[in-house]
Image (cartoon, rainbow, N blue to C red):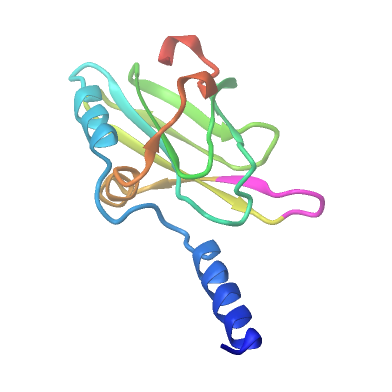
Amino acid sequence: MNVRLLFFAVTTGAFLAACQTTGSTSPNAATAAKLSSTKHAGKVTVVIYRPRNYMGGMLSPTVQLDGKSLVDIDNGRVFIGAILPGHHVFEIENQKSGTEATLKPGSAMYLKVEIVPGVWKGNGKLTQVAPEQGEFEAKRLELINPSQIDDPAFR
C-alpha cells in the first residue's frame, strides 16, 4: 500500500474526529433524569451547559450567579440546579458576557456557554437560549463533576 495514501487516510480520519462539535445524538439518561427530578414548583430550574467543541476544549470558564462563583463549566458538560425565584444576574467571571432575568416559580432558564477566540486565550460567552433548544442540547451532554461546582449548596 502506498505510504502517502495511508498517511492521508489516517490524518483525514484524525481531523474529522477532532472536528466533531456535538456529543452523542441520543439523550444521556443520567442528565435527562436529573433534569426531570430538578423541576420544583416553588423554585426555578437553571441549566448551564457547554456543547462539546474542539476549540477551547481545555478551558473551564466560571459562571457566576448574582456575583458569586457557581460552577466551572467544562467542555461537553451540563450543570442543573434549582434556585429561588426572583431577579438574578448570570455572568462569566471576569468577562463582559452574561444575562439577567426575573424568574418565576416553576420556570426554567437555559444558559449556553461557548468559547470565543481571544488575544492570549479564549474567553467565555454566556447566552440565554429558548427552553426547547436548551433542553434538547443539554440532554445530550454529561453532568458536571460535583467538584467543579463552586457553591456547596448545589453539590
Span highlighted in magenta in the image: 118-125
- Residue visible at 22% across and 16% down? 42
Residue 34, how many percent across, how many down? 26, 27
Residue 90, how many percent across, how many down? 51, 31
Q: Nearer the viewer, residue 149 or 66?
A: 149
Residue 59, how many percent across, how many down? 64, 41
Placement of 103 over or under 13, stated as above or below: above
Residue 140, how many percent across, how many down? 32, 47
- Residue visible at 53% across and 24% down? 148
Instruction: From the image, give the main secondary structure of the stretch colored magenta.
Output: loop
Placement of 43 over or under 28, stated as above or below: above
Q: Residue furthest front?
A: 1
Instruction: Tell me the quarter of the image containing the N terminus.
Output: bottom right
Q: Residue furthest top?
A: 153
Please indicate whether residue 84 sits to the left or right of residue 118 in the image. left
Please indicate whether residue 32 sits to the left or right of residue 153 in the image. left
Instruction: Tell me the quarter of the image containing the C terminus.
Output: top left
Q: Quadrant of residue 48?
A: top left
Please indicate whether residue 86 sits to the left or right of residue 135 in the image. right
Placement of 82 over or under 72, stated as above or below: above
- Residue visible at 61% across and 37% down? 60
In the image, residue 121 lies in the stretch drawn in magenta:
yes
Q: Nearer the viewer, residue 63 or 13?
A: 13
- Residue visible at 68% across and 39% down? 95
- Number of marks drawn: 0
In the image, residue 79 lies in the stretch drawn in magenta:
no
